[in-house]
Image (cartoon, rainbow, N blue to C red):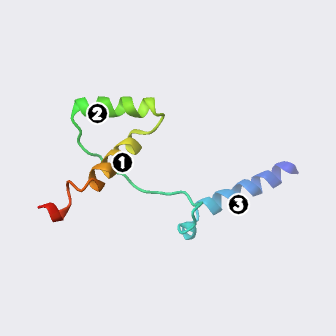
Amino acid sequence: MSNDFLNKLAKQANSQLDNDDQHNSPFARQKETSKPIQVRESYYREIKKIAFLNDQKMVDVIDDMLRYAIDSGKFSEDEK
Protein backbone atom coordinates (compact mmCIF):
# COMPACT_ATOMS: atom_id res chain seq x y z
CA MET A 1 0.00 0.00 0.00
CA SER A 2 2.82 2.43 0.78
CA ASN A 3 4.30 1.57 -2.61
CA ASP A 4 1.11 2.87 -4.30
CA PHE A 5 1.37 6.12 -2.38
CA LEU A 6 5.02 6.60 -3.35
CA ASN A 7 4.26 5.87 -7.01
CA LYS A 8 1.42 8.39 -6.97
CA LEU A 9 3.65 10.97 -5.28
CA ALA A 10 6.45 10.38 -7.80
CA LYS A 11 4.07 10.80 -10.74
CA GLN A 12 2.71 14.03 -9.28
CA ALA A 13 6.22 15.39 -8.66
CA ASN A 14 7.34 14.55 -12.20
CA SER A 15 4.26 16.11 -13.74
CA GLN A 16 4.78 19.29 -11.74
CA LEU A 17 8.44 19.52 -12.68
CA ASP A 18 7.73 18.91 -16.36
CA ASN A 19 4.80 21.32 -16.51
CA ASP A 20 5.58 24.12 -19.00
CA ASP A 21 3.17 26.49 -17.25
CA GLN A 22 5.64 26.84 -14.41
CA HIS A 23 8.37 28.47 -16.53
CA ASN A 24 7.89 31.71 -14.59
CA SER A 25 8.57 29.98 -11.30
CA PRO A 26 12.08 30.50 -9.87
CA PHE A 27 12.04 26.83 -8.86
CA ALA A 28 11.24 25.48 -12.31
CA ARG A 29 13.98 23.67 -14.20
CA GLN A 30 15.63 25.89 -16.78
CA LYS A 31 15.72 24.37 -20.25
CA GLU A 32 18.00 26.40 -22.45
CA THR A 33 19.40 24.82 -25.57
CA SER A 34 23.03 25.04 -26.58
CA LYS A 35 24.69 25.11 -29.98
CA PRO A 36 28.03 23.62 -31.01
CA ILE A 37 30.84 26.08 -31.63
CA GLN A 38 34.35 25.72 -32.95
CA VAL A 39 37.18 26.27 -30.50
CA ARG A 40 40.89 26.03 -31.14
CA GLU A 41 42.39 22.83 -29.73
CA SER A 42 44.66 24.71 -27.30
CA TYR A 43 41.70 26.65 -25.87
CA TYR A 44 39.62 23.50 -25.69
CA ARG A 45 42.19 21.75 -23.51
CA GLU A 46 42.52 24.81 -21.27
CA ILE A 47 38.73 25.17 -20.88
CA LYS A 48 38.42 21.46 -20.15
CA LYS A 49 41.10 21.76 -17.45
CA ILE A 50 39.40 24.80 -15.88
CA ALA A 51 36.05 23.00 -15.87
CA PHE A 52 37.58 19.95 -14.22
CA LEU A 53 39.42 21.93 -11.55
CA ASN A 54 36.31 23.96 -10.70
CA ASP A 55 33.96 20.95 -10.89
CA GLN A 56 31.83 22.65 -13.55
CA LYS A 57 30.50 21.72 -16.96
CA MET A 58 32.43 23.01 -19.94
CA VAL A 59 29.34 24.79 -21.26
CA ASP A 60 29.10 26.75 -17.98
CA VAL A 61 32.78 27.75 -18.10
CA ILE A 62 32.44 28.90 -21.71
CA ASP A 63 29.23 30.75 -20.83
CA ASP A 64 31.04 32.63 -18.03
CA MET A 65 33.92 33.47 -20.37
CA LEU A 66 31.62 34.73 -23.11
CA ARG A 67 29.54 36.76 -20.65
CA TYR A 68 32.74 38.36 -19.29
CA ALA A 69 33.92 39.23 -22.80
CA ILE A 70 30.55 40.64 -23.86
CA ASP A 71 30.23 42.69 -20.66
CA SER A 72 33.76 44.09 -21.07
CA GLY A 73 32.47 46.39 -23.81
CA LYS A 74 35.08 45.34 -26.36
CA PHE A 75 32.39 44.08 -28.70
CA SER A 76 29.84 46.84 -28.20
CA GLU A 77 28.42 48.67 -31.20
CA ASP A 78 29.33 52.09 -29.73
CA GLU A 79 33.09 51.52 -30.13
CA LYS A 80 32.91 50.75 -33.85
The residue wearing badge 1 is 63
Q: Label 2: few (<14), some or many (≥20) within 10 Å?
A: some
User: Which mark is first along the chain, 3 or 1?
Assistant: 3
Question: Alpha carbon of mark 1 to alpha carbon of mark 3: how far?
Answer: 33 Å
Q: Looking at the figure, which quarter contains the C terminus?
A: bottom left
The residue wearing badge 2 is 44
Question: Alpha carbon of mark 3 to alpha carbon of mark 2: how far?
Answer: 41 Å
* Residue at the spot 47% in from the left edge and 57% down from the top edge: 31
The residue wearing badge 3 is 12
* Residue at the spot 82% in from the left edge and 53% down from the top edge: 4
Tell me which amino acid carries mark 1.
Asp
User: Which mark is first along the chain, 2 or 1?
Assistant: 2
Q: Secondary structure at mark 2?
A: helix
Quadrant in which residue 29 is drawn: bottom right
* Marks 3 and 2 close (CB-CB < 8 Å): no
Q: Secondary structure at mark 3?
A: helix
Which labelled disc corresponds to residue 2? none
